[in-house]
Amino acid sequence: MMTTSVERRLFTVDEFLRMATAGILREDERVELLEGELFPMSPIGARHAACVNALNVYLSRLLGERALVAVQNPVQLSDRSMPQPDIAVLRPRADFYASRHPLPEDILWIVEVSDTSADYDRSLKLPLYANAGVPEVWLFDLINHQVELYRQPTPQGYRTFHRCASGDAISPDAFPDIRLVVDALLM
């Protein structure tokens, strides 16, 4: 019996963007590029959307002009990874990132909201964020009604992890003066 080796075709961010421009990927097609591979994104349920909306309102109000709250927009982590986090809290720029997508050094922290994709976020996206040096990631796990905080990135993953539940308040390392109550955000 002969075995066949299958070679995977990995894409760069530039190729990924050109596929969208050429119409190979539709504008409304929900895919993200992770380590050169295209991954379909889960449909957004009502609880997920409500949590993202609440986070957007609270963070925008609390941060004002100190940061830009980007909702479900891509960030470029490397030449082969362009995920679309639910929220990316970014350093402000006068052009609002019109000239390029945010890079790791632009990211203050990332928020992923999960009602069905927690394993995907933990196993695929968190290692990419850590390897790129994203300082902090919050994972809102709507199924287990908790928030996971990941901090201190290394190429091997995040050095610190903390689980927050009902009654807890959280503050980002970038802005320790703001506090969000977990109960107000977990839908």
Image: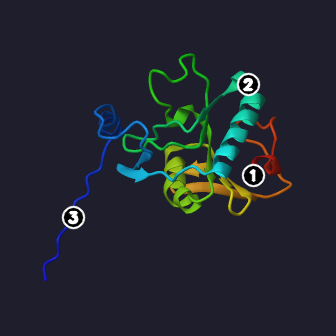
- Drawn side of residue 83 relative to residue 35, left or right: right
Identify the residue under disc 2: 64
Q: Position of residue 185 (x, y in %)?
A: 76, 47
Q: Amino acid at mark 2?
A: Gly
Q: Position of residue 56 (x, y in %)?
A: 69, 36
Q: Position of residue 11 (x, y in %)?
A: 30, 45
- Identify the secondary structure beneath mark 1: loop
Q: Amino acid at mark 1?
A: Leu
The furthest residue to the front? 46
For marks 3 and 1 on the same chain, the one whose residue lies earlier in the sequence: 3
Identify the residue under disc 1: 186
Alpha carbon separation for disc pair 2 and 1: 22 Å
Mark carried by residue 6: 3
Q: Position of residue 108 (x, y in %)?
A: 63, 36
Can residue 145 be spotted in the picture? yes
- Drawn side of residue 110 relative to residue 101, left or right: right
Quarter the N terminus occupies:
bottom left
Mark 3 touches mark 1? (CB < 8 Å): no
- Identify the secondary structure beneath mark 3: loop
* Residue 49 quadrant: top right
Q: Residues within 10 Å of mark 1 (few under 14, many from 20)?
A: many
Mark 3 touches mark 2? (CB < 8 Å): no
Q: Which colour scheme appears in the figure?
A: rainbow
For marks 2 and 1 on the same chain, the one whose residue lies earlier in the sequence: 2
Q: Nearer the viewer, mark 3 or mark 1?
A: 1
Q: What's the residue at 32%, 35% (across, down)?
A: 14
Mark 2 touches mark 1? (CB < 8 Å): no
Alpha carbon separation for disc pair 3 and 2: 50 Å
Can residue 138 be spotted in the picture? no
